[in-house]
């Protein structure tokens, strides 16, 4: 039975989770640039966490696609 969570060819851009992760990154980017000081370490941490959410989905999709090819 094929896995319904990831598309067969790894099209992670179509996943709801990826779309939400993009929104979270965009909102986080807006927030830190409008409400926090530029040199604040919190800015870096928040942006890195939001970026990691997106990247984990991309890497997981690639790994799932590669494992199906074996």
Image (cartoon, grey):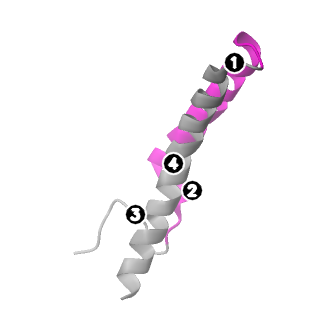
**First of labels 2, 3 by sequence position:** 3
- Counting residues from the start of the chain, the first of labels 2 and 4 encountered is 2
Label 2 Cα neighbours within 10 Å, binned few <14 / some 14-19 / many ≥20 = some
Compared with residue 17, is residue 3 higher up or lower down, i.e. above or below? below
In space, the residues marked 4 and 3 are separated at their CA atoms by 11 Å
Q: Where's the N terminus, which quadrant?
A: bottom left
Q: Name the disc covering residue 13, or none.
A: 2
- The mark that comes first in sequence, 4 or 1, is 4
**What residue sits 67% from the left and 18% below the top?**
31
Mark 4 vs 3, N-terminal side? 3
C-alpha separation, residue under disc 2 versus residue under disc 3 = 10 Å
Label 1, label 3: how far apart the Cα atoms are: 37 Å
Could you give the CA–CA distance between mark 2 and mark 1, rounded to whole angstroms? 31 Å
Q: In terms of sequence position, does the residue under pointer 2 or pointer 1 come before the other?
A: 2
Q: Which residue is mark 1?
A: 40
Left or right position of 35 against 3:
right
Mark 3, Cα crowd under 10 Å, few <14 / some 14-19 / many 20+, is: some
Which residue is more in the foreground, 9 or 58?
58
Which residue is identified by label 3? 6
Q: Which residue is mark 4?
A: 18
Q: Nearer the viewer, mark 1 or mark 3?
A: 1
Labels 2 and 4 touching (C-beta < 8 A): yes
Residue 3 position, x and y percent, is: 29, 68
- The magenta span reads 10-38
User: Residue at horizontal 70%, vertical 13%?
Assistant: 36
How far apart are labels 4 and 1 at the CA level? 27 Å
Q: Most extreme residue toward the bottom, as rendered? A: 70
Above or below for 56 versus 69: above
Estimate the x, y position of residue 62 in percent, counting from the top left: 49, 69
Viewed as shown, does residue 18 lie left or right of 64? right
- Residue 24 drawn at (x, y percent): 56, 32
Residue 2 located within the stretch drawn in magenta: no
């Amino acid at each position: 039975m094929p896995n319904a969570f990831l598309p067969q060819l790894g099209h992670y851009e179509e996943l709801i989770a990826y779309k939400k992760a993009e929104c979270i990154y965009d909102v986080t980017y807006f927030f830190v640039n409008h409400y926090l000081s530029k040199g604040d370490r919190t800015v870096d941490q928040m942006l890195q966490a939001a970026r990691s959410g997106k990247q984990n989905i991309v890497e997981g999709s690639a790994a799932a696609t590669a494992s199906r090819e074996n």
